[in-house]
Image (cartoon, helix red, strand yellow):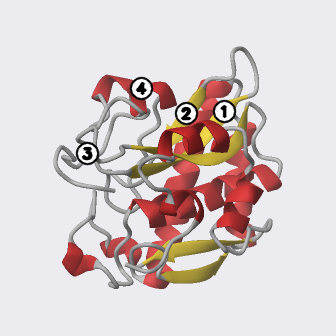
Amino acid sequence: MAPVHGLFAIGLAGLVAACNTTAQMAPADFFADESLEAPVKNAVTVCHGFGCRYKSRMPVAAADLKTLKASFAKAKDAREEREAISKATVLLETRAGQLYGTSADLPGGTHNELIGDPTQQDCVDESSTTTGYLTLLEDNGFLKFHQVRYPAARGIFIDGRYQHYTAVIRETAGDGTEWTVDTWFRKNAQPPVIMPLKDWLLDWTPSREKQLPEEGPVATAAATAG
């Protein structure tokens, strides 16, 4: 796997402390930590090949931005906005798949033989890319009820779980509930797993009743890493 740094290079002893620290950090800090070119309003970096081995700069067409703007304009509350986020992720993953071959990406990919395959994405690729997608949406002013946060991690090996990563959003109202936008469990361009981060941190395979939306197959992750 390609060398990783920042959140993705944290050792066992520092992971829990790092999660508490990174929860207070912004996506800009993440892109700097991982040496990723930050999104702009019409372009985003797509990581693929496992561990961000390949970093492809994807342009986002004006027509797609118009579609996204219209979708988010319909959202009247945080839940509806999460539904729009799910649809936006599907659209952007579809475009990435067309450009870079990640339409062939397998759900829950971890196998060593996939390392270096530019059509495949592990959870490092997925969480990095999805954080970029979400930041692009935020930078375009589409998000009214959520802020994009630094990705989260779970699993420290000694607790019987491999490390796994997800993109995170936080509600701007109420108690500021944080939600995952985890695109790793499902194949390319399927709805992401959107569920409360506090539950994701405890559930190795997310509980279906906590997902939004519910359609789409979920990969079994009981014995695999992200």
Does residue 91 appear anywhere in the picture?
no
Viewer-side residue, 177 vs 68: 177
1 or 4: tag closer to the N-terminus: 1
* Residue type at numbered disc 1: Arg
3 or 2: tag closer to the N-terminus: 2
Residue on which disc 2 sits:
179
Question: What element does badge 2 sit on?
Answer: strand
3 or 4: tag closer to the N-terminus: 4
* Residue type at numbered disc 2: Trp
Where is residue 226, by image quadrant?
A: bottom left
Q: CA distance from mark 4 to mark 2?
A: 9 Å
Q: Residue at x 18, y 46 (%)?
A: 220
Q: Position of residue 29 (x, y in %)?
A: 74, 57
Q: CA distance from mark 1 to mark 4?
A: 14 Å
Where is residue 177, by image quadrant?
A: top right
Residue on which disc 1 sits:
170
Question: What element does badge 3 sit on?
Answer: loop
Question: What element does badge 1 sit on?
Answer: strand
Viewer-side residue, 106 vs 19: 19
Q: CA distance from mark 3 to mark 2?
A: 18 Å
Residue on which disc 3 sits:
218
- The answer to the question of whether label 1 and label 2 lie on touching residues, with beta carbons closer than 8 A, is yes
1 or 2: tag closer to the N-terminus: 1
Does residue 108 appear anywhere in the picture?
yes
Name the front one of labels 4 and 2. 4
* Residue type at numbered disc 4: Asp
Residue on which disc 4 sits:
199
Placement of 102 over or under 146, stated as above or below: below
4 or 2: tag closer to the N-terminus: 2
Name the front one of labels 3 and 1. 1
